[in-house]
Image (spheres, helix red, strand yellow):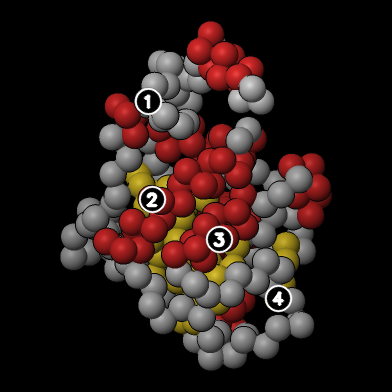
Amino acid sequence: MKNFLPALINLIFPPLCINCNTPLIGGDKLLCSACRAQLNFIKDFCPVCGSPDSGNSCQLCSTGRFYFDGARSLFPYSMVVQNLLHNLKYNDFTGCARYLSKFIGNYLNEIEPFEDVDIITPVPLHKVKQRARGYNQSLLLACEVARWLPRPVIKDLIKRTRFTGTQTRLNRSERQQNVRNAFSLNPKYSLEQKNILLIDDVFTTGATVNSISNLLKDNGINRIYVLTIARA
Ligand SMILES: [Zn+2]
Ligand SMILES: [Zn+2]
C-alpha cells in the first residue's frame, strides 16, 4: 500500500527524459533509451591532455604546459551530457551521480584503469559556493569512482583560497589568470610520492586542474591524473 501512491503518480505523470522530455518507460531513469544511446566514450584521445581525435600532434598540448600526467574524459560535451551535469548540480544530484556510476565503472574497465592511483580527490568548490549549493558535485563523482577503483577519497585535500567566480565567459588565458594561486593544500596530509586522481565534472581548457596539478607537483606528489565526465 505504501508504494501505491508513487506508482499511481508515475502512471498519471510519468517521469520525463531530462534531455528530450519523452515519457520514460520500462524502468528507464533520467534518460530515455534513445538519448542514453548517444552517450559514447571518447576512445581516441591525446595521452596527455585527453583531447579527442588529436592524432600524433595535439593542438592543446602544443600551446601550453600541463602539470598533470594524463587527463581523461568519459564523453564529449553534448546536449545529453550537459543536461545530465545540470541535473547533477542543481536537481537530482545523488540520483544522477549513481546514474553516472555505471558509466564510470565501464570506462575504468574498458578505457583507462588508473591502476597506480593511491588517492582520489575532488576539485573543490569555494566554501561560499558549497554552502549555497549544499554539496560539491565533484565529491559525489569521486565517491562513485571509488566504488570501482577502491582507493581512499580525501575530500579536503585541496582548498579553494580565493573565490574565482564563473569561468563560462573567459578564454583560456583569462581562465589561467583567474585560477592562479586560487588553491592551497591541506597541511594535515603528507602525500609525497603518492599518485593522485583528480575528479571534476567538465574539462574545458584544463586551467583549473592544471593550476591544482602545479601545486601538487610543487608539494612532491608523484603522478597526477585527471578524470572528468565531459570534455568541452
Ligand atoms: Zn530522451
Ligand atoms: Zn594533448
Q: Which residue is mark 4?
A: 185
Looking at the image, tell me whether mark 3 or mark 2 is earlier in sequence order.
2
* Camera-nearest label, 4 or 2: 2
Give x and y (percent) for residue 153: 60, 70
For the residues marked 3 and 4, what is the alpha-carbon distance in whole angstroms? 18 Å
* Camera-nearest label, 3 or 4: 3
Q: Is residue 42 above or below residue 193?
A: above
Q: Residue at x 49, y 36 (%)?
A: 84
| Residue 27 in view | yes
* Camera-nearest label, 1 or 2: 1
Question: Tag 2, which secondary structure?
Answer: helix
Locate residue 65 relative to residue 36 in the image: left or right: right
Question: Tag 1, which secondary structure?
Answer: loop
Q: Which residue is mark 2?
A: 103
| Residue 88 in view | no
| Three-letter residue code for mark 1 | Gly
> Label 2: few (<14), some or many (≥20) within 10 Å?
some
> Label 1: few (<14), some or many (≥20) within 10 Å?
few
Q: Which mark is residue 26?
A: 1
Q: Specify the quadrant of the image occupied by residue 142.
A: bottom right
* Disc 4 Cβ-to-ligand 2 distance below 8 Å: no
Q: Is residue 70 above or below residue 191?
A: above
Q: Which residue is mark 3?
A: 142
Q: Is residue 33 above or below residue 21?
A: below
Q: Specify the quadrant of the image occupied by residue 178.
A: bottom right
For the residues marked 4 and 1, what is the alpha-carbon distance in whole angstroms? 47 Å
Give x and y (percent) for residue 189: 70, 83
For the residues marked 1 and 2, what is the alpha-carbon distance in whole angstroms? 20 Å
Locate residue 141 relative to residue 57 in the image: left or right: right
